Amino acid sequence: MSRLALLAIPAAVAFSSTPESMVTVKGITTDCDGSQCFNRLHPSIPMAAMAEPDQATSDYKNTSCTSCNFDFERNTKHIRTLHQLAGPVGIAGAVAGDKIAITILDIEAKTQGWNHAAPDLGMLSDMVTAGTFNWWMPKGPNPAKPDCWVSELFPDVEIPYNPFPGIVTVLPNMEIVQREREITVLEAGGTAQAAGSGTMGLTGDFPSERHVCGEGGSDPENCLRTIAPDRITVGNTLVIECFVDGCGIGIGDVHGAQGDGEVSITAIEMEALVKVKVKLIKPDDPMYHLPSPTTLGASLNPLHSSPFVSFHGFGDKPEPIPDFAGEANFPWPIQQHITFGEVMNNMTFVADNLEMSGRNALIKCIKFLHDVLDYSFNQGLILASVAVDLRIAQVVDKPQASMEAYLPLDIFTGEAKVKMMAAVGM
């Protein structure tokens, strides 16, 4: 048996039916105080709204600015409370063990976007010594669906508008919440982002931040903290298992564009209206055989139709660090070395490790942008986070698995395009 529910969440999600059937959910403050949003995951969080079949639900996430300055400290003051999600929205008739299929119907940008690079965050967290904040402005006749994004920090660069929600999630049950995750990794000397405030967005008793399955979590298989692939976009469907009655859908962290990997930790983050529809999948439905999570789509074009340059990375530790990165105390081999075990310490590479390979490919790409366009390290990292795709090159040449950092050249215009095309011999 299956049932359809329609939700509508501007800036996060929306199920589209008829305007008069919409249930409005508003998340209008960064810390979710007094508004219908949440930014941590726990089964005690109450539903902000319930959606019957064919109803619509709307939520607004306010991330706009009155003065788009580039002050890193000012713009990242409340970074621990990101990202607020629309909801939780309960689906009528859903019980724990059911599955739901969330289809993205439409996404409209509400404001400009932003991204940043910061110490201790992102794929090259150990190499970023100072923060850089950047605004992206919509360009085109329709600001709600711009042709591309432009920025003062990147003259002669246009990033195509390819929107999708970076977080699509459901409320976890207590068994998931109590699993060993971020703090366990941190206590072992590894790298992880703990959830921060244990009470943010929660009503009722709460044990401790150790038991939060939240932003920065390491249990995406069940909690779907942030999967952030751009395949979860208009026309495509995500299938997720429900862990609590009502399921408790949350959608947010909407991106206007992103490179696969989101390597600086932010894509083009924007306020948006996202329209979705939800199908409730019971155990007797043929779709119930799909594992959670699964993404469905009509087509997938993995490559751009434009010229490109792709940088290859292998598991050597480490590739030479660019002088302009300004990092004097680069750890060897990388910050996450504890996860590789002591046996790796005397090896010249990390066997079968795509993380190291991806780092090395990304460093090559950033150095190329510096050499050709004189970008700073943070500029290169910020651009890579919204435009460069990290892709698996091969995993069969054991023990040297490899990655590619794929840079599309059609994002460059004017003098930057001339320099880039000359540098690649095109």
Image: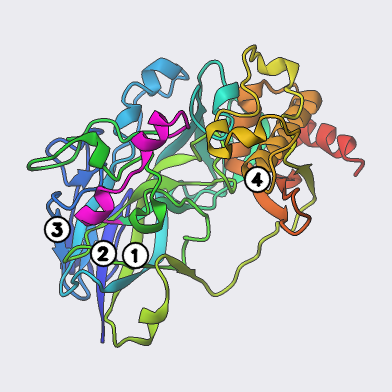
For residue 371, what is the image quadrant?
top right
Report the amino acid beneath label 3: Ala
Is 178 on the left-hand or right-hand side of 301?
left
* Label 1 sits on residue: 276
Q: Amino acid at mark 4?
A: Asn
Residue 74 location (% of width, % of height): 37, 17
Q: Residue flagged by tag 2: what amino acid is it?
A: Leu
Q: Earlier in the sequence, mark 2 or mark 1?
A: 2
Query: Mark 2 sits on what residue?
Result: 7
Q: Element under label 4?
A: loop
Contact (Cβ within 8 Å) of mark 2 with mark 1? yes
Residue 49, numbered circle? 3
| Picture quarter with the N terminus | bottom left
**Disc nearer the start of the sequence (3/2):** 2
Q: Which one is earlier in the sequence, the residue at label 1 or at label 4?
A: 1
> How far is mark 2 from mark 4, CA to CA?
40 Å
Q: Earlier in the sequence, mark 3 or mark 4?
A: 3
Q: Earlier in the sequence, mark 3 or mark 1?
A: 3
What segment carries the magenta color? 170-192
Q: Which residue is mark 4?
A: 353
Q: Residues within 10 Å of mark 2 (few under 14, many from 20)?
A: many
